[in-house]
Image: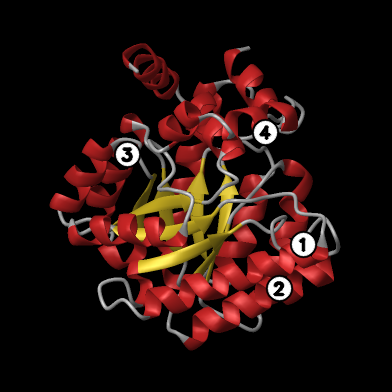
Amino acid sequence: MFRATLLYLSRNRTLQRQATGLPLARRLSRRFVAGETLPEALAAAEALNRRGILVTLDHLGENVTNPEEARRATGEYIEILRQIAQRPGLAGTRCTISVKLTQLGLDTSDEFCLENTRAAVSEAARLGNWVEIDMEGSLYTERTLNLYHRLRLEFTNLRVCVQAYLYRTQGDLRPLIEVGASVRLCKGAYDEPPNLAFPKKAEVDANYRRLLALLLSEEARKAGAFAAIATHDERIINWALGTIAEQRIERQHFEFQMLYGIRRDWQEQLAAQGYTVRVYVPYGQEWYPYFMRRLAERPANFLFLLRQIVSA
């Protein structure tokens, strides 16, 4: 009920307008959001890189229905890529980008979104960089994967995200492995009905381990697949480390991914042990839906917020 309430509030436009106008809310969001401008995001990325941690930048925004707004978002991502290329400490894949397809016009049409996404991926390829295609709610899963597979025929500098809480994901993962895809495996942060998603955390965790075992399998590695292990769950991380050690999986086949402001201790610890760690760094004025989903994911995030409010 707690999680469902916060996810419902994340979609409330009236509350979003009110929250984004409050200085306290904007300040509290900085725990999980690097700022509202690109220079702030780049500064956060450089700070992480200096600590040996890689970055994926995300210009926040979703469910864009105005074509001109989608084109502007595409232009913003192209500018991000060019700014990254101008900074020696970030160049290459030390700082990549992540895109939400509904921000690039998926709610307008698949072809329009494909055109915009292709422009960003093409520019990334020109600059020696990568684009991660984020996964949104289940309404978009099939269309997101279809668009990824179409772009994969033209480009290899792509990663796509899949969500362990959906029943369908094992079936989606197999064709990705076959083409040697780079795949970000996360649990999932949207409110999905029980006919589409595992309703219990223990079930999601068990499915995550099954899917990760597939991504790390010898078959997947031989096909060229890459596993981006996106979780803050200590038990799953320890399970992954045990599997990697037991199967003697070389480190070029995987990396750990975490979110900005969450489990910094694990980020530092894994990086210190020589594992590749990449942190997803969001920024932008459309921070409210993302911020609310982070609060819904873990009670610890919500408790942190309450402590900050009390001490303010």
Q: What is the CA distance from the residue labelled 1 to the residue labelled 3?
A: 35 Å
Residue drawn at x 49%, y 54% is: 184
Q: Verify CB contact (< 8 Å) between mark 3 and mark 4.
A: no
Q: In this view, does 141 lie to the left or right of 85?
A: right
Earlier residue among tags 1 and 4: 4
Q: What is the CA distance from the residue labelled 2 to the residue labelled 3?
A: 35 Å
Q: Is residue 118 left or right of residue 34?
A: right
Q: In the rendered structure, which amino acid carries the disc numbered 2?
A: Asn
Q: Name the residue under label 4.
A: 17
In this rendering, the label closer to the viewer, 1 or 3: 1
Q: Nearer the viewer, residue 249 or 110?
A: 110
Name the disc covering residue 263, or none.
none
SS of the residue at dot 2? helix
Q: In which quarter of the image is residue 118?
A: bottom right
Q: Which of 153 and 191 is in front in this view?
A: 191
Q: Mark 2 points at which residue?
A: 116
Q: In the rendered structure, which amino acid carries the disc numbered 3?
A: Ile
Q: In this view, does 247 lie to the left or right of 178?
A: left
Q: Nearer the viewer, residue 80 or 167?
A: 80
Q: How is the image coloured?
A: secondary structure
Earlier residue among tags 4 and 2: 4
Question: Residue 166's spot in the image, x, y percent?
Answer: 65, 38
In this rendering, the label closer to the viewer, 2 or 3: 2
Question: Residue 257's spot in the image, x, y percent?
Answer: 38, 50
Q: Mark 3 points at which residue?
A: 237
In this rendering, the label closer to the viewer, 1 or 4: 4
Earlier residue among tags 1 and 3: 1
Residue drawn at x 38%, y 56% is: 40
Neighbourhood count class around disc 1 (C-alpha, 10 Å): few under 14, some 14–19, many 20 upward: many
The quadrant the N terminus occupies is top right
Neighbourhood count class around disc 2 (C-alpha, 10 Å): few under 14, some 14–19, many 20 upward: many
Q: Nearer the viewer, residue 269 or 261?
A: 261
